[in-house]
Image (cartoon, grey):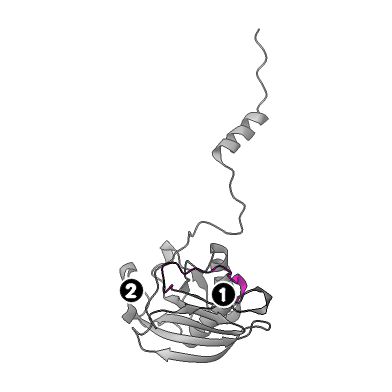
Amino acid sequence: MACLAVALPMTGGCAGFETWPPIEPGDRIPNRDEAAIGQTMTVALARVIQDYPPRGDSDQMVAINLPAPLVTEGVYRRVARDIETELGDQRLVSPLTESRMNLPVYHVAGVRIRTGKAEIDVLRPVFGVGELDRAELTNDEAYEGYTVRLSGGFRPWRVTWVERFTPGIISTPAINPIDQGASSDAEPAPAAEEQAADQAAEEPAEPDQG
């Protein structure tokens, strides 16, 4: 379980093979299927969150921690929204941010996708709300592991099997918080120089004193 593979569908009906985390330093993902990665993580996380909710209030918000090499910020936010849709009105789900480190965190620890089959490794906290500080968020003994097997691809992804592991079997991934104030859907703000130029263009020119 130390090295968790990622096999991503290639174009033309063939299946590529890459690994995440990488076995070799040069390993990379040249043909990333962003849609399949986001969809499989969404279904797997929703299943684990629903079946193994955090201790405490029934409506407790949870955070998700997705691997930086696999997802953009837009995918990160979309997965959180889609998990809420999968769960209905049961629970609020947030991408992990600096201000939400105290929430119960569900991690994606590994992704393997190949020709309509997928395995997603998910970690869920075994402690209650507020019992872990930031330094302990990657403590292997603080999480119980699950490998969620799915089928899909040309049809919606669905769970076919969930395998459960004792704490410490699946290693906890690095923390990957995103900027809480940023929004992937927002238009980028113009640079300061452009703002100054626009303001100058709007101001009336002073009359010639000569």
> What type of secondary structure mainly makes up the magenta span?
loop
Q: Nearer the viewer, mark 2 or mark 1?
A: 1
Q: Residue at x 61, y 83 (%)?
A: 115
Q: Position of residue 129 (x, y in %)?
A: 38, 76
Dividing the image into 4 quarters, which one contains the C terminus? top right
**Any part of residue 174 in sight:** yes
Q: How crowded is the residue under tag 1: few (<14 C-alpha within 10 Å), some, or many (20+)? A: many
**Res 118 quadrant in image:** bottom right
SS at badge 2: loop
Question: Residue at left 66%, top 30%?
Answer: 201
Task: Say few, some or many: other residues with alpha carbon within 10 Å of mark 2 (under 14 / 14 to 19 / 20 or more).
Answer: some
Along the viewing direction, whichever of 26 and 101 lies nearer the viewer = 26
Residue type, mark 2 in image: Leu
Q: Is residue 90 visible?
A: no
Where residue 198 appears, x then y in whole percent? 64, 34
The residue lying toward the viewer, choosing from 146 and 12, is 12
